[in-house]
Amino acid sequence: MKNDPVILQATEAGYLGHPVEAMFSSAVWLGHMAGAALSKYGSLAPVQATTSRGYSIRVQTAGGDEYTVKFLGDCLDRTQITSKQAPQ
């Protein structure tokens, strides 16, 4: 996965519950919201993050798992999280 440090910083902030100034639906906003969603989901902390197709963010966690967080609906208020587990 190609890491984007700006998206990673926003994703980490969202994961930790820290605020981020970002315009609605921007890549930074998506990263922040993805971090918050993964925190609620119970994943480990993000270590890499990048944008993906559409309104989605790909994240790799400290445990090596990869998640794609998609934002759905007219207001991007629903999330769909898919995961690819790290090899054991």
Image: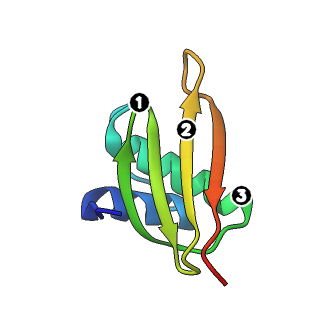
Q: Is residue 43 above or below residue 21?
A: below
Q: Would you call the spot at circle 3 few (<14 residues within 10 Å), some (14-19), or many (20 or more)?
A: few
Q: Nearer the viewer, residue 48 or 12?
A: 48
Residue 17 can be seen in this image: no
Q: Is residue 57 above or below residue 61?
A: above
SS at circle 2? strand
Question: Which of the two labelled residues, at mark 3 and mark 2, occupies the earlier sequence position?
Answer: 3
Residue found at x 33% / y 34%: 23
Q: Would you call the spot at circle 2 few (<14 residues within 10 Å), some (14-19), or many (20 or more)?
A: many
Cα separation between marks 3 and 2 = 15 Å
Label 2 close to label 1 by CB (< 8 Å): yes
For the N terminus, the quadrant is bottom left
Q: Is residue 74 left or right of residue 55?
A: right
Residue furthest top in the image: 74
Residue 7 can be seen in this image: yes
Cα separation between marks 2 and 1 = 8 Å
Residue found at x 55% / y 20%: 75
Residue type for callout 3:
Lys
Residue found at x 35% / y 46%: 51
Q: x, y percentage for residue 46?
A: 49, 70
Residue found at x 45% / y 47%: 57
Read off the residue under disc 2. 70
Read off the residue under disc 3. 40
Read off the residue under disc 1. 54
Q: x, y percentage for residue 79?
A: 64, 37
